[in-house]
Image (cartoon, rainbow, N blue to C red):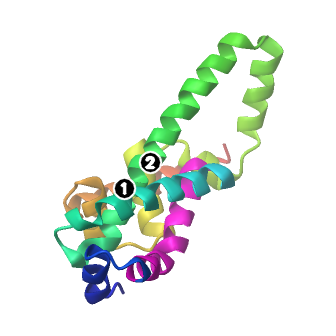
Amino acid sequence: MINETIVKQAQNGNKQAFQSLYQEIYEDMYRMAYYLLQSKEDAEDAVSEAVFDMYRSITGLKKTDAFKAWAMKILSVKCKQKMKEYVQRRDEELVQDDYADALNLEQQVVQRTDIMRAMNVLEKEEKIIVVCSAIAGMSSDEVGSVTGLKSATVRTKLKRALAKMKGRLEAGV
């Protein structure tokens, strides 16, 4: 549970208070970034970039009790940017590489774990909802703050996303 007094101290420029807040949510941030990006290095980069942005803009945080949701929203933006970079890089590589390299890339994708393959059937928003809920342990209200959705909508989308994943896993695809 985030201490609102520490958030206020961080907003007033107390670096140790900000560090304390960061230590409290780092693991959740890293897990979310890792599951979304599927790369240790990219997850670390996204978390670092998010923390830098959080530090620069913490004075603009209006609701101190929403610190974690605010931090996760910033991280989700950084992860979305990284995902766009993936698509751009992949497209450039496919254009530059020959057919054999494209097949190799396809084989690498096929070899992912069952969970990652099941997550691949989800839309970006669904992935964020699943990761925030199942991995980061956020409530539907907190996930709603991150995604801009109502908590009831988050619960509905989570249920549907998990059903999609279950269907994919049961099919063994």
Most distant residue in the left direction: 62
Q: Is residue 172 magenta?
A: no
The residue carrying mark 2 is 78
- Is the Cβ of the residue at disc 1 closer than 8 Å to that at disc 2? yes
Dot 1 crowding, Cα within 10 Å, few <14, some 14–19, many 20+: some
Decide: is 114 above or below 123. below
* Horizontal and vertical percent position of residue 121: 51, 42
Give the quadrant of the C terminus. top right
Amino acid type at mark 1: Ile
User: Can I make out residue 147 in this image?
Assistant: yes
Where disc 2 sits, the SS reads helix
Dot 2 crowding, Cα within 10 Å, few <14, some 14–19, many 20+: many
Residue for point 35% across, 72% down: 68
Q: Quadrant of residue 106?
A: top right
Decide: is 69 above or below 104. below
Residue for point 77% across, 36% down: 108
Residue for point 25% across, 73% down: 66
Answer left or right for 151 relative to 172: left
Separation (CA) of disc 1 from disc 2: 6 Å
The residue carrying mark 1 is 74
Answer left or right for 144 relative to 36: left
Answer left or right for 119 relative to 38: left
Decide: is 120 above or below 149. above
Query: Bounds of the magenta span?
Result: 17-39
